[in-house]
Image: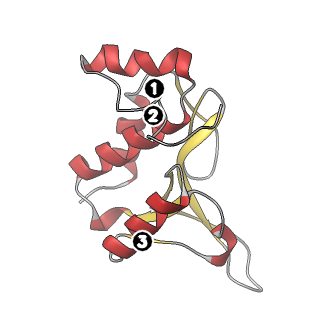
Amino acid sequence: MADVDDVRQLALALPHVVEIDSDGFDFRVANKGFVWSYPEHKPGRPRVIRTDIAVLYVGDEAEKQALLLGEPERFFTTPAYDGLPLVMLRLDQVTVDRLSELITDAWRMRAPEDIAGDLDDALGSAPPPGRAGQPVGDQRA
């Protein structure tokens, strides 16, 4: 099962990634967050940074719902994240290989087109279908 050290190692292995100073972890590409530690909010209590839970950028509501419904033991959300393309991942419920796939996908969706090819060059693979760094059907600039 994965942990915070795996998140850090996988995220920093991707091109152009910066880790933002935080109480947990916070990784960005081109100043856009793609994976960070979960800031848990409980009414009447201070926020707690949970490094056993990762917040992942997933691109759109359809992908979010697919993960939440398909793997509820791994993924969850809260009302604070309604309408946002983000899911929370219980790190102790995922393998390092699956975590690598999720972090890489999040990176691809957040990386600008002009640097997205750097990952493909590093991996020696072609970009996914659609615009580099964006899922098919995603028309955001």
Please name the residue that numbered disc 2 is placed on. Answer: 108
**Numbered disc in front, either 1 or 2:** 1
**Numbered disc in front, either 3 or 1:** 1
Viewer-proximal residue, 109 or 88? 109
Look at the image and tell me in which quarter the N terminus lies: bottom left
Residue 33 can be seen in this image: yes
> Which residue lies at the image location 39% right of the left edge and 65% below the top edge?
67
Please name the residue that numbered disc 1 is placed on. Answer: 132
Viewer-proximal residue, 103 or 48? 103
Q: CA distance from mark 3 to mark 1?
A: 25 Å
At label 1, counting other C-alpha atoms closer than 10 Å, the crowd grade (few under 14, some 14-19, many 20 or more) is many
Viewer-proximal residue, 58 or 96? 58
Is residue 42 shown left or right of residue 28? right
Q: CA distance from mark 2 to mark 3?
A: 20 Å
Please name the residue that numbered disc 3 is placed on. Answer: 68
> As shown in the figure, which amino acid type bears the numbered disc 2?
Arg
Q: Residue 64: x, y in percent?
A: 48, 62
Position of residue 5 relative to residue 18, above or below, is below
> Which residue lies at the image location 30% right of the left edge and 43% below the top edge?
100
Mark 1 vs mark 2: which is more N-terminal? 2
At label 2, counting other C-alpha atoms closer than 10 Å, the crowd grade (few under 14, some 14-19, many 20 or more) is many
Is residue 139 shown left or right of residue 72? right
Q: SS of the residue at dot 3?
A: helix
Circles 1 and 2: CB atoms closer than 8 Å: yes
Mark 2 vs mark 3: which is more N-terminal? 3
Q: Quarter of the image holding residue 31?
A: top right
